[in-house]
Image (cartoon, grey):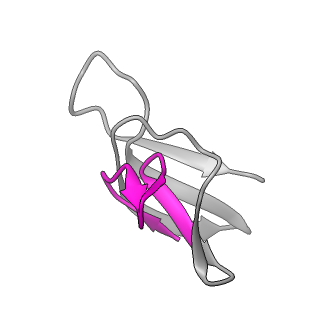
């Protein structure tokens, strides 16, 4: 699993977050609008931090939890 400010991995369109499985990159289901600063796991859930949602303030850092 990788996150950042990219919109493609090996020619595959992704929304700033992707994972590698079975010898290929895959887009992750989340729609990240700006950038991912960090990824982690807490209580078996993926936690993403960064500028991840649309916001009126360009420096509005946020945290999201992916529960599956």
| In-image side of 65 versus 67 (left or right) | left
Numbered circles on residues, count: 0
- x 39%, y 55%: residue: 8
Residue 12 percent location from the top left of the image: 48, 57
- x 47%, y 45%: residue: 15
On whether residue 49 falls in the magenta region, the answer is: no
Q: Residue furthest front?
A: 11
- x 46%, y 40%: residue: 32
Q: Is residue 34 above or below residue 36?
A: above
Q: Residue furthest bottom?
A: 23
Q: Residue furthest right?
A: 68
Residue 17 percent location from the top left of the image: 48, 56
Residue 20 percent location from the top left of the image: 57, 75
| In-image side of 55 versus 31 (left or right) | left
- x 60%, y 69%: residue: 41
Residue 55 percent location from the top left of the image: 35, 21
| In-image side of 64 versus 61 (left or right) | right
Q: Report the magenta residues as a range.
A: 1-19
Which one is in front, 10 or 18?
10
């Amino acid at each position: 699993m990788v996150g950042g400010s990219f919109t493609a991995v090996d020619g595959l369109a992704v929304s700033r977050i992707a994972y590698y499985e079975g010898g290929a990159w895959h887009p992750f289901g989340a729609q990240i609008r700006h950038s991912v600063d960090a990824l982690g796991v807490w209580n078996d859930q993926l936690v993403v931090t960064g500028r991840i949602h649309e916001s009126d303030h360009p420096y509005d850092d946020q945290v999201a939890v992916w529960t599956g």
